[in-house]
Image (spheres, rainbow, N blue to C red):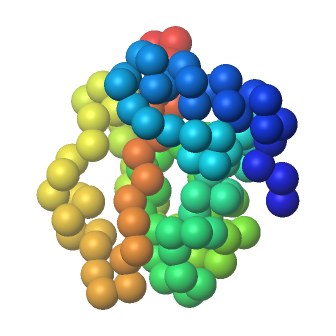
Amino acid sequence: MGAGLPQLRAMVADFYNQWYGLQLTERNVLITTGCCQAMLMALTAAIQPDREVIVIEPFFALTHIVGVAGAIPRSITTHAANGYQVDSQEVIDAMNERTDTTILNSPDNTTADR
């Protein structure tokens, strides 16, 4: 899979170097076609097949991407009544020895206009 146009990657590295005082090169930058590709690449690099990933609902395409990456999604649902706030104890209770990571997508497309 390509990492993006080298000139664009160099320009992004230069921007972050100037803005944040970093020392990146184009080798530190990956350009994707969108958020789904970026999330799929990150998840396939970070999780092991048949492990669990906690996904906070509502979400944008994350359960599907977790499944494609080979993991098992475990959903925690938030609600409008409490401002879509995540209950930290629910996250702790959902964790077990098979949990690889937790994904919190914020703001989510379904709650951004509320």
Instruction: Tally the numbered discs.
Output: 0
Residue extending furthest top? 113
Q: Position of residue 60 (x, y in %)?
A: 61, 41
Locate residue 30 relative to residue 110 in the image: left or right. right
Residue at 67% across, 24% down: 11
Q: Examine the rendered structure and indicate whether residue 7 appears above or below residue 29.
A: above
Q: Position of residue 111 (x, y in %)?
A: 49, 24
- Residue 83 picture location, percent across and down: 30, 26
Q: Is residue 104 left or right of residue 48?
A: left
Residue sitting nearer the eye, 7 or 73: 7
Q: Quadrant of the N terminus?
A: bottom right
Quarter where residue 9 is shown:
top right
Against 28, residue 52 (above or below) is: below
Q: Residue at x 52, y 12 (%)?
A: 113
Give the side of residue 15 with respect to residue 93, left or right. right
Q: Position of residue 24 (x, y in %)?
A: 50, 38
**Is 46 displayed left or right of 76 in the figure?**
right
Q: Is residue 107 placed above or below 4 in the rendered structure?
A: above
Question: Can the viewer see residue 72?
Answer: no
Query: Can see residue 11?
Result: yes
Residue that extends furthest to the left in the rendered view of this protein: 89
Q: Please name the residue shown 23% across and 59% down the image.
A: 90
Q: Front-most of 90 and 61?
A: 61
Q: Quadrant of residue 79?
A: top left
What residue is drawn where x is 45% and y is 18%?
A: 18
